[in-house]
Amino acid sequence: MDKLNIVPFVSVENMMRLVNAIGPERFMKELGLVIEDDFRRWESFDKVARIPSHSAEGVIELMPTSDGEVYGFKYVNGHPKNARSGRQTVTAFGVLSDVATGYPVLLSEMTILTALRTAATSATAAKFLARKNARTMAIIGNGAQSDFQAIAFKSILGVDKVRLYDIDRSASLRLARNLVGTGIEAVICESGADALEGADIVTTVTADKQYATVLNDNMVGEGIHINAVGGDCPGKTELQKEILLRSDIFVEFPPQTRIEGEIQQLDDDYPVTELWQVMAGEADGRKSDRAITLFDSVGFAVEDFSALRYVRAKLQETGLFEELDLLADPDDPRDLFGMLLRAKEREKLAV
Ligand code: NAD
């Protein structure tokens, strides 16, 4: 990695090896701590709402941030109908760069990493917002993100019972199968209301590009923590508005969440608390056992930055990367064209 033109690249194959080598539970726990660290130094980051390109079928977004030393961005899409053609709803890749030179220092797959960071962020938020000793979680929407959510909540909070509901029962069966042997007991439920019976936490992680009502007001009892993950785009929400009016609402970056989150249903000046302030001890999290807390998650660039930073820190010890010849690096920096000419000469000699 000393060669200036070489950038470490973490492929999907190597990401899977990395997660399996570390173990998903430990990965999530360690990543949660990195996210917490970065949220505590929130004010040192350049922040901007992600830059979307919407279409009828979905969205493609760029998510940049920098802490002044390292710059990072993620490319990510969200296409709810992709599953019908055998594709993922969400795919992603990301880059970290050295601010001093502008040179990239990491290129990584982020489809798997996004699921890990989303789940680690959710569980870390719940650590501050859910009732202490929460052990049972309802998961509504049992697609690609849901296994990661279950494992993160087990690892970071000790949740060991999940109550599953999906409009497609085969999705719940798939999730329950994947959780066998994790120490998490999974119960498949007949409805969202059934899933919420006895739950301390509910995670909504459905995908549908519409104002959906995955949770309605009378399903939500006192003291519950709502981890609302699926509503993350203009025109795409999961909760009935009345629930928001009864909840203490926590968000990542208000300018982004007001456009994309559940709170797009509320006035622009409706009071919300920034999650980083709770983690930094500057604002209250849960105020009582009877309060309803809501983490209106949309996914923010700092979480991706944390995830890439975590992966980068593991590269030397694991060697799980390839060397990518990504940057043109002529001997004389000004002689870029000469580098082309010399390459042509070499090709001629090789014939
Ligand atoms: P997916 O398509 O793999 O799974 C979604 C599941 O939801 C499917 O099994 C579907 O049958 C189910 N579903 C749809 N409507 C439902 C309803 N009304 N009730 C119950 N189940 C329902 O999608 P995924 O990759 O798991 O992503 C889920 C959502 O999470 C997406 O909307 C995605 O954009 C969002 N997401 C958010 C973040 C974040 O940081 N907040 C990060 C990643 C993904």
Image (cartoon, rainbow, N blue to C red):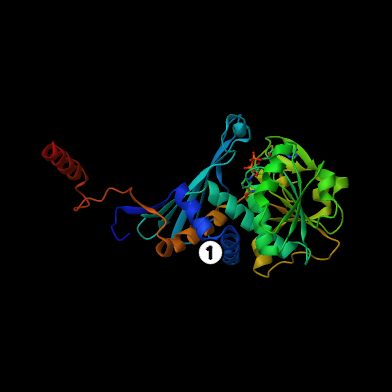
As drawn, is 155 to the left or to the right of 44?
right
* 196 horizontally vs 2: left or right: right
Q: Is the residue indicated by label 1 positioned so its CB lies within 8 Å of ligand 1?
A: no
**Residue 58 position by quadrant:** top right
Which corner quadrant of the figure contains ligand 1? Answer: top right
**Front-lying residue, 340 or 7:** 7
Q: List x then y, in percent, for residue 121.
A: 63, 57
State the image coordinates of residue 33 (x, y, percent, origin top left).
59, 66
Residue pushed farthest front?
A: 181
Who's the residue at 32% across and 53% down the image?
6
278 shown above or below 264: below
Query: The residue tagged with tag 1: helix, strand or loop?
Result: helix
Q: Nearer the viewer, residue 131 or 166?
A: 166
Q: Quadrant of the N terminus?
A: bottom left
Q: Which residue is mark 1?
A: 44
What residue appears at the point 52 percent right and 61 percent down from the top-left corner? 22
Which quadrant: the C terminus? top left
Left-right relation of 126 to 27? right
Residue 206 seen anywhere in this rendered image of the structure: no
Type of amino acid at the residue the image marks with label 1:
Ser
Can residue 244 be seen from the camera position used here? yes
Residue occupying the point 71% across, 57% down: 184
Q: Residue furthest bottom?
A: 281
Observer-nearest residue: 86 or 131? 86
Q: Position of residue 87 (x, y in %)?
A: 56, 35
Say above or below: 273 vs 174. Answer: below
Residue 326 image point, x, y percent: 33, 47
Residue 282, by quadrant, is bottom right
Residue 61 in the figure: left or right of residue 103: right
